[in-house]
Amino acid sequence: MRTVTLGLKSLWLHKLRSFLTALGVVFGVASVVAMLAIGEGASHEAQEQIRKLGSLNIILESVKPPENQSASTEQRSMVIEYGLTTRDMQQIRQTIPGISIVVPSRYITEVIWNFDRKADGQVMGVLPVYPEMRNRVVTQGRFFSDLDLTAHRAVCVLTASTAARLFPLSTPTGKAVRVRNFYYTVVGVIEDETRAVGTDTSPSSGGESQAQILIPFTTLMDQFGETFFRYRTGGFEAEKVEFHEAIIRVGNADEVESRAEAIRHLLGTNHKKEDWRIIVPVELLKQAERTKQIFSIVLGSIAAISLLVGGIGIMNIMLASVTERTREIGIRRAMGARQGDIVVQFLIETVLLSGAGGLIGVALGLAIPIAVSHFAGVTTVVKAWAPTLAFSISVITGIAFGIYPARRAARMNPVEALRHE
Amino acid sequence: MADNAVEPIIRLTDIRKVYRTGDIDSQVLGGISLDIFPGEYVCIMGPSGCGKSTLLNVLGCLDQPTTGDYFLGGQNVAHLNDDELSSARNRNLGFIFQSYNLIQQLTVVENIAVPLYYGGKTDREMRQISEKLACQVGLDHRLNHRPNQLSGGQQQRVAIARALSNSPLVILADEATGNLDSKSGKEILDLFDDLNQQGKTLVFVTHDERMVERCTRVVRLRDGLLDRDEPGARSVARPKVAA
Ligand SMILES: Nc1ncnc2c1ncn2[C@@H]1O[C@H](COP(=O)(O)OP(=O)(O)OP(=O)(O)O)[C@@H](O)[C@H]1O
Ligand SMILES: [Mg+2]
């Protein structure tokens, strides 16, 4: 303890020098803690999104194939037929083992009305298991039931943002919304769709938060049929899509990837065009984890380098300090200090320096993510081990880079040290 | 030495010190045998380069003789390892240097306490002892000053207090008055007289002829050998030395 006060005194004697020396460690530790928090936050967000898609799910989407340039100029009004078909669904059900359910859905892009309030968006025809399959929570009322489905009822569920837009002042349940000339009774509200990073080219995205209402699949088929017309500059364009999306649930988590491979193969032989897409959340999750690993390795290297630089800075200053204090060392040795006492004295100084630098660095490193998430709206996650690790490494750096100067100080010949000018 | 009343504090037997620079050996001490008894005030004198400081370093356990034995307070310290030497210095020796050698970042009291610190004394003991000693050397009004706020004479007083703090067997000094003007040099010499009167054993290397008048014994070296060993002006009856 007395040696600690002694070390503090020596450091205090050269306040500016000590501060500048510790600065290297401060920035090293701060950057490590901050980057880890930001990186952890980013991957946390990505993983949350992917998890929402469901780890047992395989999601198929219809994709409009790249437009054939000559065809579209010759015939401005043609029916483009693409996407997942009933045949695909049947074959998946019949030939691929270990699949518990296949949930297809269809989307229609339309304007949704509540009297004079409107929202551009999608009408999705889905099955009652949809919320469970996509991990979307019904926040108000209920989702439609099997009865609604079999009876082809005109009921709908709004997404939270759509509900807020169409019914800003009242609860939507029990009221009706209009699409074209069809009216749907709102039975519930469901949370907005979260999209995994890298999958946002699906037809459901586009605008920031596109309005969305979900209606029974059967009702949609009745009212809108299989062909969907859309007005485009220069003419009408018609698309015929049987299913826009299908969610396939695999019974066993271990089988998801092999089943996905089988479905890829199946669809590959069925479709000549690239008019479908497969999203396997488990694969995405693994990919995200790999990315995170690489990120961690890169961060680790940066951390190592910055702490190395900080450590070298400390060592440099301590060597200078040892030379400068040769006389003091000689005096202490003459007064009975053992080599070990001198080593401890100098080591404590470096550890105090690097430890103080580490503490300030941790504080700074915790402040930066808070500022970032406050001003940039990015999620940051500070894992308790990160600051602890960074701090311990800074102390270890102090010891590692302090041991040489300290030993050098201790090994000095007392007679020569006393003669030193 | 069966019927000897007084044991020597220091007994050197045929101490040799050889420095090796490159391939050339130069013998700085050529076989010195010397006994120093409690209460003696010994001046070691001789021309420059004759090996006085080298001898004092050996006496101070700062340097090991190449050959020979050195008994300090009955313990042969010629073959101790570094840690044992450190502790021998701490327990038995007090040092006074020509250039004071105070630690600049420490106050007067803290400087005096340095040997106590390595002697494992508590903070309280350190403070008590060093304050008492500071008063004894006439620095009671400078307790918390730093060395650079003191005159040379005052700094040397601090160094003397520091040399006394561990109640060592012997106090060693190399040119203790060398840096001081005649007035403050005289004050320091008076202080040494007091210490010797109190029974402290002093072994001083010096060029200062005034010291010869005050000491009890003068040892003259020449080319690394004992040239003459004669009583000083204040010599008392030498204790009988066993053959
Ligand atoms: N580390 C060393 N290596 C080699 N030779 C040394 C070393 N230290 C001292 N010497 C030599 O030993 C001799 C005695 O040196 P010492 O310092 O003991 O002399 P001194 O009697 O104290 O002289 P002065 O009165 O000038 O202080 C000198 O010739 C010096 O060159
Ligand atoms: Mg000398």
Image (cartoon, rainbow, N blue to C red):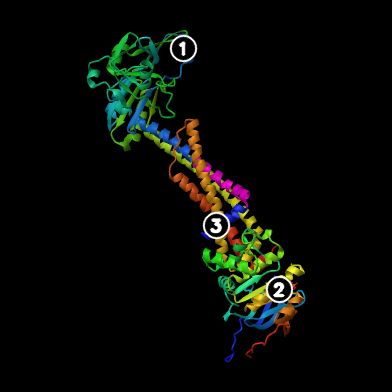
Q: Amino acid at mark 3?
A: Thr
Q: Main secondary structure of the magenta part?
A: helix
Categorize mark 2 by other alpha carbons within 10 Å: few (<14), some (14-19), many (20+). Answer: some
Chain at numbered mark 3: A
Along the horizontal axis of the image, is A196 left or right of B94? Answer: left
Residue A26 magenta-drawn?
yes
| Precedes in sequence: disc 3 or disc 1 | 3
Would you identify the image quadrant in which residue B200 lies? Answer: bottom right
The amino acid marked with disc number 1 is Ser
**Residue annotated with mark 3:** A5
Could you say where residue A202 lies in the image, as x and y percent from the top left? 41, 23
The answer to which image quadrant residue B115 occupies is bottom right
**Type of amino acid at the residue the image marks with label 2:** Leu
Residue A262 rendering spot, x and y as whole percentages: 34, 31
Tell me the residue that label 1 is attached to.
Answer: A72
* Whether label 3 touches label 1, CB < 8 Å: no
Check disc 2 and report the residue beneath it: B189
Image quarter of residue A418: bottom right
Magenta-drawn stretch contains B3: no
- Residue appearing at x 69%, y 61% in the figure: B150
**In whole angstroms, how far apart are the C-alphas of marks 3 and 1?**
84 Å
Task: Assign a secondary structure to mark 1.
Answer: helix
